[in-house]
Image (tube, rainbow, N blue to C red):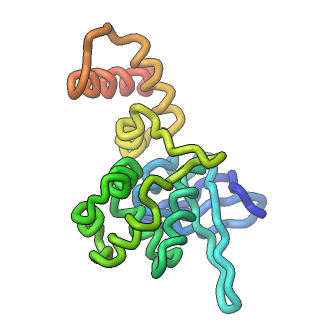
Amino acid sequence: MFNSIRGTITAKFEDTLRLLTGGIEWDITVPHTDIGLFSQPGTEGQVFIWLYHREDQMRLFGFADEVRRSTFLELLKVDGIGPRQAVKIMGGISQTELQKALDTGDVGRLEAVPGLGKKTAQKMILTLKGKLTGEGGKPQAASPHSDLAAALAEMGYDQKAAADALAKAEASLPEGLSGAELEKALFRQAILYLSGA
């Protein structure tokens, strides 16, 4: 079946991405948190997709990477969560926070996600605690600077270019930095690389 679509991004909305490929413009439902990870309209992008098909409707759901799609599919295993609610949940909490809340049984953090009640939060923990996996069934390993890459993407930079700039910045910084000091230095240096300075 479909794995991904690559084409020209024509529009980005709060939870929808439009992608033009081969003369067809696709309308793809995407979690709010993923929208910022895609390049700006007019540039090329790749969307990892999942097709929802019922007798009366068909809809494409898209994600920034395969880990995000895997999370979506895991959420669908929770009793009472359908595709639209899964996208809404993912749009209200970052990947790292979601995994941490599930693994630590933090009902309160999950309840803070818009539209997510206590019962559903408890069901999510029971069903998914320790089970969020990436490709090949291995536990998800978020990039060490995924939050910084996401912040740069929100500023309009390409996600892959942002990740590459952060890796380059990390290699160029002096040893001994840690915590907030390291993040600030990485962010500043990555912007310099991305702006060509």
Q: Is residue 86 above or below residue 34?
A: below
Tell me which corner region of the image, top left, top right, bottom left or bottom right, holds residue 121: bottom left
Task: Return the residue found at the far top.
Answer: 174
Residue under the image location 36 percent in, 36 percent down:
148
Can residue 197 be seen in the rendering of this structure?
A: no
Residue farthest to the bottom, as pictured:
56
Please identify the quarter of the rendering in which residue 59 is found: bottom right
Q: Is residue 29 left or right of residue 188?
A: right
At horizontal 27% and vertical 65% (from top left) the residue drawn is 107
* Nearer to me, 101 or 38: 101
**Is residue 164 something one can see in this rendering?**
yes
Q: Which residue is pictured at 49% across the width and 67% down the height?
A: 75
Q: Position of residue 72 (x, y in %)?
A: 52, 63
Eyeballing the image, is 36 above or below 17? above
Seen in the image, is 68 located left or right of residue 50?
left
Quadrant for the C terminus, please: top left
Where residue 70 appears, as percent x and y from the top left, is 57, 56
- 50 shown above or below 94: below
Residue 28 in the image, given as x and y percentages of width and height: 58, 67
Left/right of residue 116 with respect to residue 25 in the rendered view: left
Q: Position of residue 26 (x, y in %)?
A: 65, 67
Q: Is residue 181 left or right of residue 53?
A: left
Residue drawn 21% across the image and 28% down it: 180
